[in-house]
Amino acid sequence: MKLYLDNPQIETDFEAVKASLPGLADLRRQAMARFTQSGIPGPKVEEWKYTNLGFLARENYLPAGKSGRQAEIRQFFDQAHIKDIPGPVVVFINGYFNADLSSLPEEDGVDFSVLSHNPGNFHQSLQASEGSSSLNDLNRALVTDGYRLDIAPDVDVEHAVQIIHIATSGTEMASLRTRGQVKLGRGAKAAIIETFIGAEEARYWFHMISDMVLESGACASFGQFQLQGRNAIHMTELHTEVSDHATFNHVNLQLGAEISRTELINSFTGEYASINLSGAYLGRARQSHDIFTRINHDRPNCKSRQLFRGVLDKGGKSAFQGKVVVARDARKTNADQSDKTLLLDRGAVANAKPELLIYADDVKCSHGATVGEVDPDQLFYLRSRGLDEDAAKGLLVEAFVSEVFDDLENERVAEKFRQYAAGWLRKEGAL
Amino acid sequence: MVAMEEARNAVNEISDKYKYGFVTDIETEKAPKGLNEDVIRFISAKKSEPDWLLDWRLKAYRKWLTMEEPTWAMVDYPEIDFQDIYYYSAPKSAEDGPKSLDEVDPELLETYEKLGISLKEQEVLAGVAVDIVFDSVSVATTFRAKLKEAGIIFCSISEAAHDYPELMQKYMGSVVPVADNFYSALNSAVFTDGTFVYIPKGVRCPMELSTYFRINEAGSGQFERTLIIADEGSYVSYLEGCTAPQRDENQLHAAVVELITHDDAEIKYSTVQNWYPGDRNGLGGIYNFVTKRGACRGKNSKISWTQVETGSAITWKYPSCLLIGDNSVGEFYSVTLTNNYQQADTGTKMIHIGQNTSSTIISKGISAGKSEATYRGLVRVMAGADNARNFTQCDSLLIGDRCGAHTVPYIEARNPTAQVEHEATTSKISDEQLFYCQQRGLSAEDSVAMIVNGFCKDVMQHLPMEFAVEAQKLLGINLEGSVG
């Protein structure tokens, strides 16, 4: 069986878009060449063991149209926007920047630019994570828009920057490809919240690659909410480099989409830095969430922690593939990883592959993974206190998930996370 | 003598086709180098096997030709030329071996000394040509009589093919299908010998069975095949291997072990593997590619694997359990110790199919020198396996900063009532631990050996007693030179 699959249609798509975004033609052509050489990863590729992309070789997703119905867009915007946070908002519709709904950052030392406005300026930054995977190259070749956020050294950005990606109902069988670039200078501090939301019924392929660089002493807090429509395909990659004494906190929530794949690829480029990844994935009927993390402990004295929680109802499927690699001389590494999944009903499938690859001896590494149902003893305890079964179960599931959000510094963001999760749990047929 | 005649004819046929002038003498003890259907016919003829077994081998060979060598394991070795191997050589005659212990590698003898192995045994292990007036011969005979009394069949696979064809045909390849993987297909085509055990209904085997006590075993190590069947309500404990490092000329080992338990039966399978690991610079050593699998077919049945892996340059081994019967239990206890340039990729698979099945995995990996040890395991709970339980713990200990320890577990659960737990830790021996031992008067090396033995205790206690004592010594010996 072939490891990688072809879809000749993608090359035709490339012909149609290659002239857009002047100044990036070379870079995109090269990326396309690399993609066509490898292709779409098939189910025999170890990293894609739990998500079969066979359909991408058969189905054709054309580049999406720029706009949609105003009322619909407004509704999604209101849903995703956290109004309590007075900071800037950046909106992308069907993969294109939308100036009307956006209010761009104006703070000193915060430089924001849009890919389609000045593509040539993105030439260098688009080379980050180049060639790391065939899908990364595919995105680079077919990208329609994106953003770059540069925080100058020692700037402490006051309010969290909200970035909202909307897919309208006009995106049936369309592809939406965007890119994000974030750089925090020496000692800078910023929070970003990215929300992905889309039409309930449309079948679209949302594909985003983000690259993030934290210079020494920087501190970034990055949250992602995935609330795509139930027929959507959602794929994101987030590549992060963390330098000396820098801290990267990431919180991830996967609620929507039929097929979601979240890749979090992290490397330490300096010492005494720390990375915290946490996330929750909630799935039911036909949904499949695939979380793929990698932490490269290339430098000594760094610390990483991963905490993921999944809840699966009838028909839901999940995969957690977490890999920690401790390089030869990365002494005093401290790496911890935990993944727990609750199965609420028959017909739910949970997969986990927590990997540790260790090449240094003076390290402390551990991982734990569990799959199980709601603890009957805990359920009994609550029922003996007078709660009915559904309420008791709901409470336990909520507590199980909320552990993920406990670390969120911004209470308003944490509240929003909890709301989304609670909303999912309350949905009919959940419990 | 009809069989001899047949064999001679078969060999004659081969030589006609073999263009490099293979000598057609039935006394030849080696098949020509390389592998083709004629070599398989030669092996089968040599063993005067029934037709069905030859067909079975040929089918396996044809399947093997279509398969690719697996590359997913975290082991690195030069490509094996499968046409550059002798697939059959009869037990070596006395003339080939060293004439006396004086000719044996002194380092090997030193190890024997430390393990406290008697001189006579040392000679046998080192392959010295001795007139065997060796204890185990008489022991074996007495044992066999005793086993026969209980109705237990304990013989070589070749004998079983002749004497118990129904059992062989029914069970061989039923747990590890011929085409299960590249090495199992190869083994199925060319296996030279092995062990067959059948424990009848309700019989508790009165002693620990071990190949060590079977005299016709010699020289069949390379492509070994073991088949153990425990019928309803029976019990057997089987020991494989030997703590003493064994000399072996064959670099490639590809064994297949199949275990079957029926209702209420139990098999306990213990292994100590200490094949030649290569020298300090990583030269030579055995490549050990083993497929071991047990099927708990009956209700309340149990299969327990315990292994201490200290030898071989490359170890590729995943003793597994198919928990088919309701309430069946699978266990895997493993200690893997690698030193110098050794590489081990080992673990288990627990497939929960029946209801109320449970499995326990305890794996302890110790890497020293420039070696790499990987735990790779799969726990799968099928949709029908209500109330399945699994607990997995894999701990790794690193000694030195040039070695690697890896953990690659797979968990796949499809039943909401299942509970699967996995824990893994990696650490080194702390300076405090070492200091504590040393200030009590132990040398650094003895301290490490003691700490490592403590680290492995959870596994060691599942080994039969005599085995455990030797295995403990073995860990210490194999770690020599890795500290300081």
Image: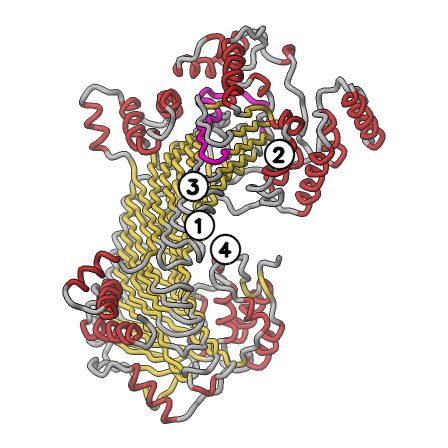
Specify the amino acid type for callout 3: Thr
- Which is more N-terminal, label 1 or label 2? 2
State the SS at label 1.
loop
- Which is more N-terminal, label 3 or label 1? 1
Q: Which residue is mark 3?
A: B374
Residue B138, given in percent of the width and then of the height, sits at: 52, 10
Q: Which residue is mark 2?
A: B168
Say the numbered circle drawn on residue B114: none
Per the picture, the main secondary structure of the magenta-coloured stretch is loop
Badge 2: chain ID: B
Specify the amino acid type for callout 1: Gly
Say the numbered circle drawn on residue A46: 4
Left or right: where A293 falls relative to A187: right
Q: Residue at x 59, y 18 (%)?
A: B216
Q: Residue at x 50, y 34 (%)?
A: B231
Task: Judge by depth and name the residue closer to the eye, A310 or A44.
Answer: A310
Q: Residue at x 63, y 31 (%)?
A: B191
Mark 2 or 4: the one toward you: 2
Badge 1: chain ID: B
- Which is more N-terminal, label 2 or label 3? 2
Mark 1 or 3: the one toward you: 1
Q: Is residue B243 magenta?
A: yes
Note whether residue A120 is visible.
no
Q: Which residue is mark 1?
A: B354
Distance (Cα) linking label 3 and label 2: 34 Å
Dot 1: few (<14), some (14–19), or many (≥20) neighbours within 10 Å? Answer: many
